[in-house]
Image (cartoon, rainbow, N blue to C red):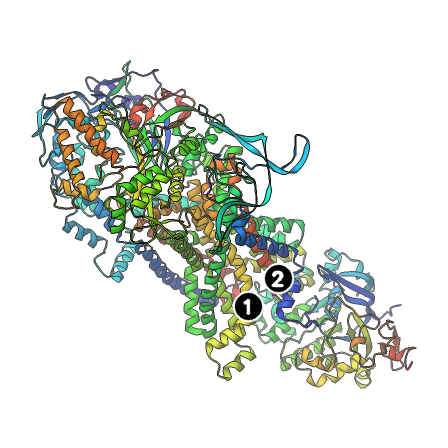
Amino acid sequence: MLARRVAAGKLPPVEQRLPKVPVVRNVQQIGKYGGSLYDQAESPGGRFHLDGALIAGAQETDNDGKIIRPHLCDRVDASPDYSEFTFHIREGLKWSDGVELTADDVLWWWKYEQRNPIIYPEGPRTFKVGNDYPDFSKLDRWTFRIRFPTSFRPCLNLSASEWMAFGSYFGQPAHWMKQFHADFNPKADELARQNGFGAWYQYYTMLREYMHPHVYKPHVGPWCRVVSTTMHDVYERNPYFAEVDQEGNQLPYIDRIYVRVVEDQNLRTARIATGAVSEGPCEMSQISVFTRNAARADYGLKQWRMANSSQCMFAFNLNHKAAVKFRVYNDLRFRQALSYAINRRRINETLYFGQAKEWQATLSPNVSYFDPSWLEYCVQYDPDRSNRLLEEAGLRWDKQRQFRLGPDGQRFITVVIFNRQTFPVELLEFVRQDWAQVGIEVIMKETDFRFREWTCRAGNHDCTCWNADMIEEVAAYLPWVTKWNPQEVLYYATDWWLWYYNRGQSGIEPPQEWKDQFNRMSAWYSATSLEQYRRLGRAVWDFFTRQLVCIGTVGYAPQPMAIKNGLHNVMDSVTMGYGTLWAKSYMVQTYYWDSPEEHG
Amino acid sequence: MIDTVTSRHSGSQWQLMWAKFRHHKLALASLGVLGVFYSIALLAPFLAPYDSWRASRFAFAPPNRIHMFHQGHLMRPFVYGIKMTSDARTFDRSITPDTSEVWPVRFFVRGDPYVWLWMVHSNLHLFGVDSGGQINLLGTDILGRDCLSRDIVSTQISVTVGMVGVFITFVLGCLIGGASGYYGGVVDNAVQRFMEFVTCLPTIPMWMALGAAIPAQWSNLKVYFTITVILALRSWTGLSRQVRSKLLQLREEDYVIAAKVAGASDWRIILTHLLPGFASYLIVSLTLEIPRMILGETTLSFFGLGLRPPTVSWGVLLQDAQNLAAISVYPWLMFPAILVVVCVLAFNFLGDGLRDAADPYKE
Amino acid sequence: MARSGAAAVPLLRYVAKRLLWAAVVLVLVSFFAFLVIQLPPGDFLDSYVETLRRSGMSVDSATLVALRHAYGLDRPMVVQYWSWFSRFLQGDMGVSLLYVKKVNVLIMERLPWTLLVTTSSMVLMYVISIPIGIYAARRQYSLGDFAASLVAFTGMATPGFLLALVLMWLGYLIFGVSIGGLQSPQFIDQPWSWAAVKDLLWHLPVPLFVVAIAGMANLIRTMRGTLLDELGKQYVTVARAKGLEEGVLIRRYPVRAALNPIISSGGWLLAELFSGETVAGIVLGLPTLGPLMYRALLAEDMYLAASCVMIMSILTVIGFLVSDIVLAFTDPRIRLS
Amino acid sequence: MPATDTILDIRGLTIRFHTRQGVVTAVDGLDLSLRRGSVLGVVGESGCGKTVMSRALIRIEAPGRIEEGQIRYSGRNGAEVALHTLDPVGSVIRRIRWKEIAMVFQEPMTSFGPQHTVGSQIGEAMELHRIASGGGLQPAVVASLRSVQMPRPEETARQYPHQLSGGMCQRAMIAMALSCRPEILIADEPTTALDVSTEAQILELLRERQAALGMSILYISHNLGVVAQIASEVAVMYLGRIVERAAVNVLFSSPKHPYTRALLRSIPRVDRDSSSALEVLSGNLPPPFERPGGCSFHPRCPESMAGICDRVTPASQRLDDGSEVCCHLYGEHSHA
């Protein structure tokens, strides 16, 4: 595809497109160019199975999430006290439109976006240490330095995590974003209005999206979005992608990714089962369909695993706006009771053939300061104990012993809003029924992805659920990028966090133990010695786990993958999940088709 | 053609209808089928061998067969035990009868407790097997719950949704159509236009829009009634159109004029003189409205906009069966679909039969 | 048929009256659509604004005021309605918070597919059910009539989603039609070619059938019923007494008359088709308006949802209008009174 | 043997309907003949089978079936056609319809299809039977309308049935019926749906056209008074049989059959509807499936003779004044 454009003079030859020292991937087999991958998403621009492949950042972790290694920066130097970090961008690195990605892009991003008082009136969260922000300085065209006022060890981890690596300095091409910024384009407001937005910063904020970038937005990942409608998205290879295989062939091998928008979860499953996508996860509750249909639909199954410490965990809104629910949800005995009430063995056997782990939601056991007792915390199936705890928490049965009443004597109903994730929705039905056994009435309400986000962020929910990632060493140091962030994903204590973050200016004052926890985390970030780092780390995670802010179910579950025959360089066994940066771990850019022309 | 004649049979309109209706074999059979449906609904907890939420160890157990012969010997009806093997490497799970275990089917057994009609506490079930064995005549679902029990219990909700909805339809249709036909003129015109407007709204999108607005935290009872109201919001137009045209026709009749002259109030005239005049038509169109409501509830629940667990209705059950596994591997999960089709068909046939019977101009 | 100039005047008046009425209905529909926006508890901007605020984004009070003003939320209900409706009429349907795009752009992407599916299923419906209806009426109580009634009734009694699921699976098993959507992946976003059209035709039958079936059942029964009524009417006997051949007289008299209720039900059928299209669209993953609206409703993206309802209703009203006008041409009683 | 001037001869005609509820015998061994150029009235209550009988003459009796008997028609050229043997959808009977035997129906407003203009429907018949075609069609249609004294025939031809009044419609219908110059015109209660003055006009028109064209008319009505104005002979029908046949003046001056007498008694009230007219008769018509044995009139007959009338079916017999009657009062059982 690119060779033709080079021949037509529309594109410089590959040597000029790659940085001086490209990233080298050792692939199992050298691939063939061409062909397309097919995938599907719930909504336009929504997550899809292969989208992890789009990630490229300053640094990356290895597949196990334990080691940080260079990626688009070939070197990052940290000062001994972890307050100064020097990033060396690969010389000659280019955006997908051919413009060079230099230290200026990073500085522009920091100065005009992150520190812009209109976009961030209260200042950005990124790199906020206490009340202060680091200094960014340009050393030369390819080198920049971040200097923190105090030690900030997680900076390295941040630059290797999905969340930061992209949302930050390598996500915003200054030369392109400028046209939407009022400081650089006086007509930015008008431009925004033409596109249906009220003001420039709203439009700008929308265009910041880095993972599934706007159609015309330059990008550093292996594929860029070129078409976006409500029916499908099309991603086309980035001619300037900085990776090559061990023989120097530029990656990715495959030209295009088609992402069909399929609103209905069952239909998505059906499409995977009938071979309509190139690679897709098999729904465990319907696994027989996949095993029976594999030959007909021309795919094979590979045994992957979910890098989840829990397939699904429940977080109650500890900052609930209604007094009764606030009281009940904040009662640790209530949360313990619900954890004891879940029959994890049955879920494991029915849905996962007994192959999953009946663990509490917590860190990966590989983390250096891990405490094994965390895994066992409140995971025994013990309805009697659960009932006892609920009585103690003041939730009494009604007269006919059908459900429990709240402390106010009213029927106590909790609505769990969720959107479909990697866990089978049947899992929720198991939990719902287990909880109903101890009298806790729960309505599982499926909602749209973004609707759940908005409702929860606004604190208008009772309880929500999500998968718990297998948090390895690198991410464990950044609780804010995990699901334990009180104001992200599960939104269990948005107001407390706001209070702490804004120094009491807004939000609700948290109880003392939570203030202690927040302070402990700050102290942890400034840790300079390994001993200090581990001790504080254990204290922080001990609190999270034993507070049961997230009630886990079963984790580390098998996840068979349906992979089209003829697709190569697909790994035989992968543990995939957010903790391992999803598709980073399965290297979609190295996939290739046996006969690319058949997969136009 | 034979000109119609006033029959020599003396008898009320109803007896006449019944006499004609009896000749309509399909409708008569449908009436029987519906009788069965409503009896099932009434006696659901007794007829169901298990509590609809009782979960067993066996997920997706296929229906077990009732046997009479064990090792060549005639026995009282029994079922075999269940044996499950599962291979975690290939994700193969098979559930087969375990012929070493024999569980005789017993009648009037004590089992899961239930409350019948909000007051009678009991644990008597029509049939079952001794504890330890399992009888799942329609298999089990992923949680190992007995599908037959769930199908039976869901019948309660599904067949009554139509009745409640039709009651609302009846009230709305009679009031609005009645006013329109009786007063005529401006009122009639306005109502007619309004009905045309309602017809312009595509049914399912409209139901969805309203269903989506039901707050999640509402109790199931509240949701249930809201759903019936939503379903009725659309269906009253057909009835009121009929009421109107009948009224227009009837209000010129002598006896109505006489009543008017005698000074009877408008509503009194409508209720005591006009309504009985076409009650049979009302019954027919109401009968034809019920299946639509049943389908409507099923569709809404299927899309997750209607009833939700722990309430079970046909739609809720079908929502679980909305996948390839149910179609291709566990077809017994689709059984509620047969219930829907049969029930709706029966109502339609019944309605047709009633229509024929109520129409004096049909041979 | 002689249609003199004098006859055109009442016809014009009739069309004008229907047009006026269609406009009134549209206004009523817009009330309903507006109600859809208003129904969800709370102010939909609350969640959105709260989201921005809590993620540290700029939602100073001035912005909030501006936002509220932009959506007209600071004004009384009537004014809000009017600002929404007047902008809708100008083609500005607001922004979808879900897709972060202009609503009219989103709708335009899907409208052609929606029209393709609805119009072709309408054609399918007529082409199949009218001959069947005629057959069933002429051979009343025959085996064929019984079969047609059975199919019609069963079609009416089967929930659309179920039929869609089963047919989709059968289509895949027997014909190998890929599941979901109307095109195989390799033809998406490619210029139209003969292969692409063939591929589309290959995908169309299941959705079309699912969309058409409910209306089809109805149509067969209407056709059969009215034709039976018409067959019993005296003018048919007269025509027969005149010595007309049976086939000719059926075509020329009762079928012509029985078509009128079919034509006049066209608008209503269109409403039914949109219902079917919504169901089939969601279950089969069609690129039509139904699934878009479904998602918008679930996400409480109310401008999008209301616009979808509005667009479908507008199309239905147009359907009603067209069927009324066609009816005026075919039925002299309407045209000349 | 049919006399040479008999244009239509019906012998022992039996027509039955097989319905799901049972078998209905609508016409039960009926004998009747029509003389060329004469006007014969057939009178009977609603449901006595007169309409079915008339339709059988052009074989549109379906879903009824001719099970016994004969219908013989002697056409213009003298050849005799056995109508009862013809295929009801065949081409032979279709050529006879309208061209030889035409019909005028009860409800003028529904006699024309609402979709086509009156003119086109008249023209259709003329074209079909090759009376006129092409450019000659339109003038022929107008001429036929003019012949029934339609005030503005050109305009009427362009109009749709719903734009005409009942009387106008019936005129147009007569024009259509006569447009092919039939030998026989069957008028099946052509004036029942019309008001009295229109009725008189239509009767006058029929009389005038009959005189002008010399066709035979079979005039069917439940109303003896109307029949008296147009027919020269009257046949009284009860439950599928002719019970009495006589010249008009004979019938009125000395009715024989008790049923005829009862009918005559109801004449003063004849302009009301039929059910009130029948109040003078004791009882109603029996239900269609329960035909009384013996003389079918016996359950309502004031002069019924027990043991005879309810057992033996009376035969037809010719009396001295030329009338024919089927009644035991006049046979061997009289005064028994």
Instruction: Mark yes or no: residue C193 visible.
Output: no
Q: Quadrant of the C terminus of chain A?
A: top left
Q: Is residue A211 above or below residue C61?
A: above
Whole-percent x, y for residue A263 in the image: 38, 40
* Residue B279 image label: 1
Rounded to the nearest angstrom, the CA distance separating label 1 from label 2 is: 14 Å
Amino acid under label 1?
Ala
Circles 1 and 2 on the same subunit: yes
Which mark is in front, 1 or 2?
A: 1
Report the chain holding disc 1: B
Whole-percent x, y for residue B294 in the image: 49, 53
Residue bearing mark 2: B356
Horizontally, residue C269 falls left or right of residue D2, namely left
Whole-percent x, y for residue D175 in the image: 65, 70
Report the chain holding disc 2: B
Instruction: Mark yes or no: residue B182 visible.
Output: yes
Q: Nearer the viewer, residue C299 or C113?
A: C299
Amino acid under label 2?
Asp
* Residue A438 image label: none
Q: Residues within 10 Å of mark 2 (few under 14, many from 20)?
A: some
Q: Nearer the viewer, residue A337 or B236?
A: A337
At mark 1, the secondary structure is helix
Whole-percent x, y for residue A236 in the image: 31, 29
Horizontally, residue C195 falls left or right of residue A551, namely right
Q: Quadrant of the N terminus of chain A?
A: top left
At mark 2, the secondary structure is helix
Q: Is residue B144 above or below residue B88?
A: below
Q: Is residue B268 above or below residue A130?
A: below
Horizontally, residue D326 falls left or right of residue A11, namely right
Mark before the other along the chain sequence, 1 or 2: 1
